[in-house]
Amino acid sequence: MTELLKQKLNDSKVLRWSVLALVSFTMLCGYFLADVMAPLKPMLEKELFWDSVDYGFFTSAYGWFNVFLVMLIIGGIILDKMGVRFTGVGACLLMVIGCSIKYFAIKAEFADGAMILGFKSQVFLAALGYAIFGVGIEIIGITVSKIIVKWFKGKELALAMGLEMATARIGTGLALMLTVPMATYFGILDASGTLRPNIPMPILLGLILLCIGTLAFFVYTFYDKKLDKSLETTNDDEEEGFKMKDILYIIFNKGFWLIALLCVLFYSAVFPFLKYASDLMVQKYGLNPESAGFIPGLLPFGTIILTPIFGSLYDRIGKGASLMILGSTLLIFVHLMFAMPFLNIWWFATLIMIILGIAFSLVPSAMWPSVPKIIPERQLGTAYALIFWVQNWGLMGVPLLIGWVLDTYCKGPVVDGFQTYDYTIPMLIFASFGVLALFVCFLLKAEDKKKGYGLQLPNITKDIPVSEREN
């Protein structure tokens, strides 16, 4: 009877896709907040007197607590021990708290010269809020990954993960495209009658969206509770909770570390790039700051179509390692093209950004669904947390590195109140991460052939002969 109920819930397309829609919307709201400051870099420098080091410091704060306080690993252990409902709700609340602090920091006025630990008070408080937010969004990320495995394992797993990633990146696209126009539209007159951009306004919108996304996750918890009740005691592996031997099994698994290295190298060439992409469009391609975010915004919107397509391809025909190799190769090409001193015109930047969107769809659509093939389901929360922890070293360190490189080696003259930069060296740094990611992809493919993880096999098991699955 329990198995029958399990099939009624897990095999109900309407129910499992509805669940996916709820948690994906929560991720969309979180991703909007994660990138809402990226297009504002020129405004932050002109209006609030930040520099590239300040901006790099702020952006690097995303990984402070995740890396140094190992909050992500703790979150993964809590996830495996306490379940998706408790962990997800807690993560949502952390995002709201962190965003509120960031909004206060940008909204408030600070005394001239006020410093905290050697940084401007405003920069430090905004970074602190972003650090707390970073804990929340990373933990909700691993929670949602485990939720999708829970509902889609043996079914359209890669497609579901692709759709979730695509939906989340709508938030990134909206942030890149709408932030500057919104700050300009809701501009505030200063004492001299000059209209100044309202920089806190996009952050306030993101905070409101985040509250709605938190409510969406609360709604999901009722479906999850219903699923657990129907399964009763059949999910013994998830009921066991965290054991030290689980984390030891993970950290001594070579396939796991190859996935983790690929993750940090690939995403270090994408997410930190997006933090500077709007400024790149202004500096290298001569776009107006108000419209500069539209070209980078094409990247996440392109993934809305491509990531589910590649995920469905992986579900049905396999070739996961090959997809990751192709995506890493395209990543190298893109950053080398951005570094080249020619064709500094908008249509070329648009074309290269579209190719980056293809790469950004290929690798994640194959990488994340490959983790359950390497790690047992009851250890997935901890495994995803460890992968995200490794990734956060890159998300923390690379923006700080790029900000320092820009401020130290790439400064040009000040034009109309805006500091100019040459982005050639940063683009070459991003390309180098792509080269390393490609090397890891080949190692992962070799390890899969040796250990038989099945990365080149389809995810929909009912389409695979039993003899082939065993191989």
Image (cartoon, rainbow, N blue to C red):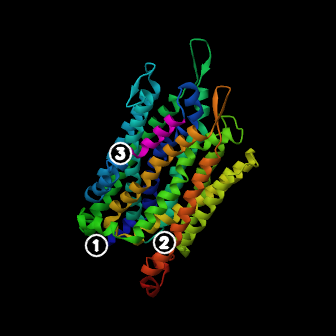
Mark drawn on residue 1: 1
Whether 425 is drawn above or below 333: the answer is above
**Residue 25 seen in render:** no
As rendered, which of 383 and 231 lies closer to the eye?
A: 383
Magenta-span inclusion, residue 227: no
Q: Secondary structure at mark 1?
A: loop
Mark drawn on residue 65: 3
Mark drawn on residue 444: 2
CA distance separating discs 2 and 1: 41 Å
As rendered, which of 40 and 413 lies closer to the eye?
A: 413
CA distance separating discs 2 and 3: 29 Å
Numbered range of the magenta stretch: 52-65
Say few, some or many: other residues with alpha carbon within 10 Å of mark 2 (under 14 / 14 to 19 / 20 or more): many
In the rendered image, which quarter contains the C terminus? bottom left
Q: What residue type is disc 3 on?
A: Phe
Say few, some or many: other residues with alpha carbon within 10 Å of mark 1 (under 14 / 14 to 19 / 20 or more): few
Of callouts 3 and 1, the N-terminal one: 1
Whether 129 is drawn above or below 159: the answer is above
From the top left corner, tell me how far across and down residue 64 is, in percent: 38, 44
From the top left corner, tell me how far across and down residue 44 is, in percent: 55, 30
